[in-house]
Image: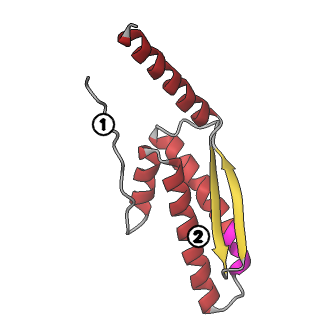
Amino acid sequence: MNTMTTSKSLRGFIASAIFGVLTTGVATISTAADGAEFLQTIVKYGDLNISTPQGAAALYNRIHAAAEGVCWPLDRGDAVSKMNVAACVHKAIAGAVTSVDQPALTVVYNAKHRQPLPIMIAAQSSR
């Protein structure tokens, strides 16, 4: 068996799978409200090239708007609930950015938040 052919075939399959996921990309925003409810929404981004700064910024804006929409029902007008909404939005955005796991999106997140998310860089094996 030719290992070079198998390796190329496997890489092609993996590349196709990754492209398929990115093409039909969906970020899920979810959070727990008062420990009783589970709030969630889906942000579609298959139309964006999130490996570019512009695409990543557009997705971040969609995620931010969706997080505010999901967390808004927690606002009862008092200071404590406003703090809970802010924490909810932050947690939802961080969770969505982490689940998308794209360096350009993480860079956008890190530019907007005091506590950055780690940027994961995949190392390619040179066998």
Disc 1 versus disc 2: nearer the observer: 1
Residue of label 1: 123
User: What is the tally of numbered marks visible in this picture?
Assistant: 2
The quarter of the picture where the N terminus appears is: top left
Boundaries of the magenta span:
70-74
- Relative to 88, is 103 above or below? above
Q: Residue at (66%, 92%) from the top-left corner? A: 78
Q: Is residue 30 magenta?
A: no
Figure quadrant of residue 79: bottom right
How far apart in space, not on screen, are marks 1 and 2 (Cα)? 32 Å
Figure quadrant of residue 8: top left
- Residue 118 coordinates in the image, percent (x, y): 36, 56
- Relative to 68, is 96 above or below? above
Q: Which residue sits furthest front?
A: 1
Q: Residue at (42%, 66%) from the top-left corner? A: 113
The first of marks 1 and 2 along the sequence is 2
Residue 89 — which label? 2
Instruction: Specify few, some or many for label 2: CA neighbours under 10 Å numbering under 14, 14-19, or 20 or more.
Output: many
